[in-house]
Image (cartoon, rainbow, N blue to C red):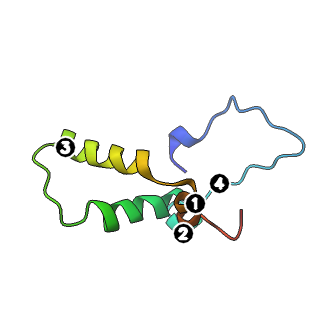
Amino acid sequence: QASWHKSDDLIEFKNIEFKLLPPYSPELNPIEKLWWWLRKEKIHNKIFKTLDDMMDALEFEFKNITHARLKTLCACSYL
């Protein structure tokens, strides 16, 4: 419910209902699983000399992740 996630100018549609997530609910947000995987499996226990080095490592992982792996990581029964 961050302020940048809300807008008074949002166009509402009759067939779409918007629901705000609770303030802290990583289990309801599929992208959180991707961030967890990146931290746990790809950059855990690595020392980067610079922030740019870490960003390069993350960019490499993003460019090389398969659609199947991404779908598995972000799968949610409620979507």
- The kind of residue on which mark 1 rests is Ala
Q: Could you say where residue 27 lies in the image, as x and y percent from the top left? A: 54, 69
- The kind of residue on which mark 3 rests is Asp
Q: Which mark is residue 41?
A: none
Labels 4, 2: front one: 2
Labels 3, 4: front one: 3
- The kind of residue on which mark 2 rests is Glu
Q: Quadrant of the C terminus?
A: bottom right
Q: Of marks 2 and 1, which one's residue comes earlier in the chain?
A: 2
Residue 76 left/right relative to 23: right
Whole-angstrom CA distance, mark 2 to mark 1, is 20 Å
Q: Which mark is residue 27?
A: 2
**Neighbours of disc 3 within 10 Å: few (<14), some (14-19), many (20+):** few
Q: Could you say where residue 51 lies in the image, as x and y percent from the top left? A: 19, 42
Where is residue 72, by image quadrant? Answer: bottom right
**Neighbours of disc 2 within 10 Å: few (<14), some (14-19), many (20+):** few
Q: Could you say where residue 49 lies in the image, as x and y percent from the top left? A: 9, 47
| Residue at figure coordinates x 56%, y 54% from the top left | 67
Whole-angstrom CA distance, mark 3 to mark 1, is 27 Å
Residue on which the image places disc 4 = 20
